[in-house]
């Protein structure tokens, strides 16, 4: 009994001496002899992102991000206070802080993390926590695929025996397409003579957020008029893709001989429809086709009247009135 008690005393003294010795050993030495690995991973549900609508200047989209962390330390070192003190030089095991950062966020979106510094328990089993990524596309967000990278980092834990760890997560998303154009010509109203061909330079500006196909067609014109629209479609880059987001096409029209009454007016209507470029397989769906823009030009006949023609008509009318009045007076005198 006495021998057994002496053995316990000796063991206890050795434990105290070992603990005291290790407490004076620099942390670098401790790390050298007791280094353990850890695992840090990030993931998200790709299907949820694919189904989300990242509409420019619209509501933000929430993307849940799952975080997993685990240390590969002998379980006895974690659960046994004595072994924890001997090998890890610590009594208390705190939580691990995960530092999340958005790497090189684009300037055309507001991007934030609901909790950029979540905590997880330090354990030999996988521990999980979640945070939420918020993405709100600005009005000028390009309708192109983009890969957003999230960086996760941890500081060294367990008194430096588990080094820092990092992980990356790439999230693929694409802002919605805005099919928006402006159609302009300097002189939409022109005076023209019969059989005189006139040209209308029509400027089309892509105000959308992606290269756009603009399809042009004539929807209404007078019978017998000759019209020419040499291009049925043009492709215009967006302002973000290119400094020049305007292109010009020319519309030509020739009135017939019958367009001869003085100040006669006729109107021709053209239609311009913006679409996503390049077209989707099998043609663009309705979501990638914008509303048609109706554009009208007006032509007024110069007329066949010669200078002073109206004045001659007035004089003739006055002469007729005087002649009729004179005849009436002669008839009354009889």
Image (spheres, rainbow, N blue to C red):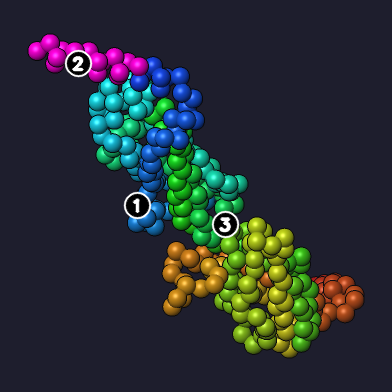
- Find out whether the residues at labels 1 and 3 contact each other: C-beta distance under 8 Å: no
Residue under circle 3? 142
Residue 75: x %, y % from top left: 26, 34
Picture coordinates of residue 163, whole percent (x, y) = 45, 37
Q: Is residue 250 left or right of residue 141?
A: right
Q: Which residue is mark 1?
A: 45
Q: Main secondary structure of the magenta part?
A: helix
Q: In the image, 299: left or right of 24?
A: right
Report the residue at 41% width, 35% height from top: 33
Q: Is residue 111 visible?
A: no
Describe the element under mark 1 as helix, strand or loop. Answer: loop
Q: Dividing the picture into quarters, in which one does residue 233 lie? A: bottom right
- The quadrant holding residue 69 is top left
Residue placed farthest to the top in the image? Answer: 2
What numbered label is drawn on residue 8?
2
Sequence order check, earlier mark of 1 and 3 = 1
Name the residue nearer the viewer: 160 or 43.
Answer: 160
Q: Tell me the tag on residue 195.
A: none
What kind of element bears circle 2?
A: helix
Can residue 201 be seen from the camera position used here? yes
Quadrant of the image occupied by residue 334: bottom right
Residue 60 higher or lower than 241, as above or below: above
Looking at the rendering, the stretch of residues picked out in magenta corresponds to: 1-17
Q: Specify the quadrant that holds the N terminus.
A: top left
Q: Residues within 10 Å of mark 1 (few under 14, many from 20)?
A: few
């Amino acid at each position: 009994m006495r021998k057994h008690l002496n053995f316990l005393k000796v063991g206890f003294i050795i434990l105290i001496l070992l603990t005291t010795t290790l407490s004076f050993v620099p942390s670098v030495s401790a790390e050298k002899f007791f280094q353990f690995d850890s695992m840090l991973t990030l993931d998200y549900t790709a299907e949820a992102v694919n189904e989300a609508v990242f509409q420019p200047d619209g509501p933000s989209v929430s993307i849940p991000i799952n975080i997993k962390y685990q240390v590969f330390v002998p379980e006895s070192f974690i659960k046994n206070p004595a072994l924890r003190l001997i090998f890890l030089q610590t009594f208390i095991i705190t939580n691990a802080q995960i530092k999340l950062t958005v790497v090189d966020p684009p300037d055309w979106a507001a991007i934030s993390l609901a909790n950029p510094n979540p905590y997880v328990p330090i354990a030999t089993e996988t521990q999980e926590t979640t945070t939420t990524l918020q993405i709100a596309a600005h009005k000028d967000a390009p309708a192109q695929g983009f890969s957003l990278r999230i960086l996760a980092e941890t500081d060294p834990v367990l008194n430096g025996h588990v080094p820092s760890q990092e992980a990356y997560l790439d999230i693929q998303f694409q802002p919605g397409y805005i099919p928006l154009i402006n159609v302009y010509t300097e002189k939409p109203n022109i005076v023209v003579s019969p059989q005189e061909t006139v040209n209308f330079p029509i400027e089309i500006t892509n105000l959308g957020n992606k290269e756009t196909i603009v399809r042009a067609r004539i929807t209404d014109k007078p019978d017998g008029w000759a019209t020419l629209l040499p291009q049925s479609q043009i492709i215009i880059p967006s302002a973000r893709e290119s400094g020049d987001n305007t292109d010009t096409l020319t519309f030509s029209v020739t009135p017939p001989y019958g367009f001869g009454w003085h100040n006669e007016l006729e109107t021709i209507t053209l239609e311009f429809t913006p679409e996503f470029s390049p077209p989707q397989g099998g043609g663009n769906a309705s979501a990638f086709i914008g509303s048609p823009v109706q554009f009208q030009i007006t032509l007024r006949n110069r007329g066949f009247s010669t200078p002073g023609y109206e004045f001659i008509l007035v004089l003739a009318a006055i002469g007729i009135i005087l002649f009729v009045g004179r005849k009436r007076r002669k008839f009354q005198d009889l």
